[in-house]
Amino acid sequence: MKAIKKIKTTEDLTQAIQYQIQKRQSEKKPVLTVSAGTCGQARGSLKVIDSLKKAIQKNSLEDKVKIKVTGCHGFCEAEPNIIIQPQDIFYQKVQPKDTEDIASQTIINNEIIDRLLFSDPISKTTVLKENDISFYKKQKRILLGDNALIDPTDIDDYLSVGGYGSLAKVLSEMTPEEVIEIIKQSGLRGRGGAGFPAGYKWEFTRKAKESPKYIICNADEGDPGAYMDRSLLEGNPHRVLEGMIIGAYAVGAEEGTIYVRDEYPLAVKHIFLAIAQAENMGLLGEKILGTDFNFTIHVSKGAGAFVCGEETALIASVEGRIGEPRQRPPFPALKGLWKYPTNINNVETWANVPLIIEKGAGWFSKIGTKGSKGTKIFSLVGKINNTGLVEVPMGITLREVIFEIGGGIPGGKEFKAVQTGGPSGGCLPKNKLDLPIDYEGLTEAGSIMGSGGMIVMDENTCMVDVAKYFLNFLRDESCGKCLSCREGTQRMWEIVTDISEGKGKESDIQFLEQLAQATKDASLCGLGQTAANPVLSTLRYFRDEYIAHVKDKTCPAGVCKNLITYSILEDKCTGCLACIKVCPQEAISGELKKVHVLDQEKCIKCGACFEACQFDAIKIE
Amino acid sequence: MINLKINGLEVKAEEGWTVLETAKFYGLEIPTLCYNEGLSPYGGCRLCLVEIGEGPKAKLVSSCTYPAEEGLIVRTDTKRVIETRKMMIELMLSLAPNSKVIQDLASKFGVTQVRFKIRNEECILCGLCVRMCAEQMDGRAIGFQHRGYKRKISTPFDIRSEECRLCGGCIYICPACQLRCQGPEAETAVCNACLNMDPTCLDHYDDLQCWMYDAGRCGTCVRESKEKSKEQTSKQ
């Protein structure tokens, strides 16, 4: 790590920021930005970086260009991608073999390589610049936007986008009460799921009589398919630290903890590095920037229990006890970590804080709806063309997110449902597509905001199967303390499994509903109270499917194996042998250009033939 | 003193009392199972649920853990409470159908059928034994393992715990495990942690049910079980 000069006063910090900003603006060399978050690395961005470096050496460009490695920009579908400044060329799905061309053609000859440009699924045109892609157009990337500009392992790079400016402002001219007032006015609500107004939470902790006080950053993101917090920690860890330092000053805490799951190795690495850099620079530690304010941050690594995202379970885990929730009240603001006042906020909430201080409460509260302000990051996954992280203003409709930003459903299939809020969220059908996304709206519709998972499902998804999947997750992730949650999720899973296997009775549906309601009512924490949502929301919007499973013993979507049969349509089969080649059971027989025959006895309903057939000759019933 | 309302009655609670303690003080009955006056409240069985608040924000909480708060409105027997409570009893019955305590609860609250598949686990994970061991006996020989549907109570690493003094406190307090607490013939066969020369569990199961992994220490069970199995094979 390069030597970092200690900064002693707020004026010095402001100067350092100005210096870095100018340095960035006066940069004359072309900059090649490669995204290498966990998603990028999984798609080979490290190899791309290696070969890019070699290509640059080979073309003797070492002194003429700069390579910058950043975190995830959000558009996972296009990873690994390279952005070339100053022209702002966006190359997507770059392979190591492409780097030679990038160096020799684009850098030296200023030629654009058409094959690496993004082809938009909606407009069907190739797009040159990142911001012109429809995926980015409707987004408002106040949090994620900087991920593309910053090398997360370099504190100076964060300063060069004005980072830590809000901290300088807070420590030089604001009292803790004023900070809390601004956060209150901004209308910022917790991004972890429940949506409690952050400013009020801070005030409770500030006003609590006991000391010491603590703050915690909840980075225990456990929803399947959700990774907003990971990308913020990986791509812009100093923003989160700055938010925490400001928060600690506001509530009067001297110690902070980041509770991050150990399954996020890159996030853990970047956050440790960021803390060390901030300490060396004097932004953490004793007498920060010459004030009387002391603050240190520890990292506590979680072992990957979904329930530890619940604040009281998280505190138990940090203290070294079993991650189990306890009764609130007393709330952590009064009795939290080590029984002292503690303020817990989610990664995304903390990341919003420096922006609100910098741009003002008014700027923030102009974004969003009446009750929900600012933006929200969703991880848009499932049956969707543009998979990735989307940051949108509150109040945008589901339709805009799925069909405009997400580019719709692949393969021309029909949209069926969208699941928001992670495993304990709910599935919303087509007629809820115009629902504006905010905390209250989603809750009313039977789902939740949660931490921001958004799973899109197409017509080939069976809703009973979806409920079964989430119940299976929840029965494993319930801490098991409350009978209602532990046995409730287990028994709901048993009933739904029976239904999906054709063993369900008609009375099961009503019984399932009763059990779901009891689980929701009787459980202690948020996990149990929302554990019934997958069942209740699918029963509310897709009851027909349950009835088809128990009454007619059929699966309308053709998913539940026990209820479907595959057969070959004689008039459509061309005898191409494709299905015979893929069938693992050798259940299909036939000769070239003759209609094939499927042996039902041998068929295990794996669906391989259905996928392989180019002529729609495989029928699912 | 804290002023609150239970079932429309204005009551006063001492600082630090729970809703359950307050109700008990006034003679208002709330059914409990995992609650014991001598142990810290746990809130696991969800039987002592009461409804607090009014209107759309009303919710159910376990009265044994919820603190008496100023102005709190508590109702102990609303439709929502009763229906949920019955479901909890039905769930318990499906896990420990032979428990007299749970059967009695079922009779009292009118639970007449179990719609779930019966799983004779003879444990509802109420945690009474764990708390008894730790808090009253200062033992900490047993605790919870795993989470979710895999959760169980056992000794650390499933081996005999050095902390266990065979006091039998866990068995004494258990509401669910019929064999351990009274055996099939209540007067004659008190199993008592396998100190008994003839563990009653072997009449019912192929394996010893000694969950404290004590078989190695007193030795009787192991000998008994081996001899019994020998006898059985020779009979056949």
Image (cartoon, rainbow, N blue to C red):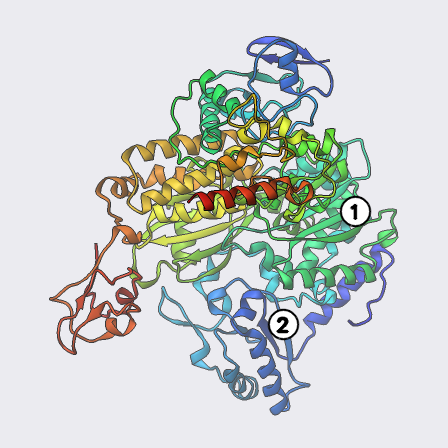
- Give the mark toward the camera: 1 or 2: 1
Quadrant where the C terminus of chain A lies?
bottom left
Of A327 and B203, the residue lying toward us: B203
Residue type, numbered disc 2: Val
Q: In this view, does A602 lie above or below A83?
A: above
At 61% from the left and 50% from the top, the residue drawn is A220
Q: How far apart are marks 1 and 2 (CA)?
A: 31 Å
Residue B73: x and y, percent?
58, 16
Mark 1 lies on residue? A255
In the rendered structure, find residue A69 and report the number of the disc placed on it: 2
- Would you say residue A334 is visible in this rendering? no
At 37% from the left and 45% from the top, the residue drawn is A497
Residue B131: x and y, percent?
68, 32
At 70% from the left and 51% from the top, the residue drawn is A258
Mark 2 — on which chain does it sit?
A
In the rendered structure, find residue A604 and report the number of the disc placed on it: none
Residue A3 shown left or right of residue B14 in the figure: right
- Mark 2: few, some, or many residues within 10 Å (few <14, many ≥20)? many
Of A593 and A52, the residue lying toward us: A593
